[in-house]
Image (cartoon, helix red, strand yellow):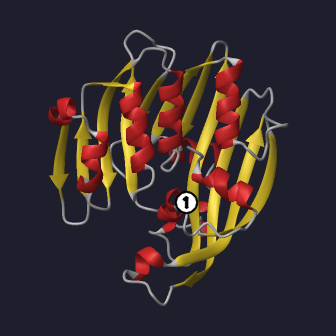
Amino acid sequence: MEHYLARIVSAKGADLSTTKPVHNRFVRYSKGTFEGPTAKISRKGKSITVKAGLDYENILGLLVLSAIKSGSVSVEGNITAFEDPRPVMGEVIPASKQDQVMMDEKKNNWILDFTGDWTKAELNKIYDVFDQRRGYILLSLSDSGDTTASFKVNPKVPRPKKGAGKGDQEENETDKIAKAIKFSTAKFLNDAGTLAAIIDSMLPDMKKEAANFKEATIENAYTISDIAIPASAVDKRLAAVRKGILTRKITIDGTRKSIQYPFVV
């Protein structure tokens, strides 16, 4: 799995509107400027800690899943789905695990509550299938036999936030980032392979600068300037193609760089 922001970075403005893991992340946005996800990566001693906001949960969950050494992973949380999950549940939920998933159908979404122990292969399939669908994979992962890797994520989805207004500009930058990264926490062993995987997934445009960093902060924002609706669209909101600019402010060991990428999603 490639994180949707990494795809925008590598696409260099190419049309990604038919790429579901990217397009689905923008369905809820109208025209305007919106705060995207923020993340902070810290390396200290033998550990790497990543704290992040909504929209980094899929890639962090997969990175932790890859880092867990045991074949069995303890799972707690849910998949919040915005399209009916039943057509794919048989594909990803083994018959022996049906009692470990409870579905609650609500007015505008479905909640699939997960508990118990799952194999890494089963969880990889869940991430692979549900990353293609509208919704959020909010699964906390751990292994009692391996305390070096774990993932904790909030089971509730926050509302999208508009870009900072005049009243927010005086907020302390440190406090602002601290609030933005409360949604999830991933912990890893600080080894070369894990560090390279994190950089590839979260800092693909700063690989040289991040080669041996101690702390990195990533702030993303979207400015959507145009929304085009295909003439054949059945659901205009879901089919709408959004054009705009992704702005990434990346601070590595105190040095900040701002980079912009055009997108069509």
Furthest residue in direction bottom, as rendered: 231
The quadrant of the rendering that contains the N terminus is top right
Percent across and percent down for residue 256 are 80, 46
Position above or below: 128 against 239: above
Percent across and percent down for residue 227 are 56, 82
- Looking at the image, residue 263 sits to the left or right of residue 107; the answer is right
Instruction: Locate residue 106: give its quadrant.
Output: bottom left
The quadrant of the rendering that contains the C terminus is bottom right
Q: Nearer the viewer, residue 57 or 130?
A: 130
Q: Nearer the viewer, residue 206 or 216?
A: 206
Q: Residue at x 63, y 49 (%)?
A: 172
Circle 1 residue: 22
- Asked which secondary structure carries label 1, the reply is helix
Q: Nearer the viewer, residue 176 or 106?
A: 106
Furthest residue in direction top, as rendered: 145
Q: Residue at x 50, y 50 (%)?
A: 55
The amino acid sitting under disc 1 is: Val
Percent across and percent down for residue 28 are 44, 69
Q: Residue at x 48, y 43 (%)?
A: 58
- Looking at the image, residue 74 sits to the left or right of residue 177; the answer is left
Percent across and percent down for residue 253 are 78, 33
Instruction: Locate residue 243: give its quadrant.
Output: bottom right
Position above or below: 127 against 237: above
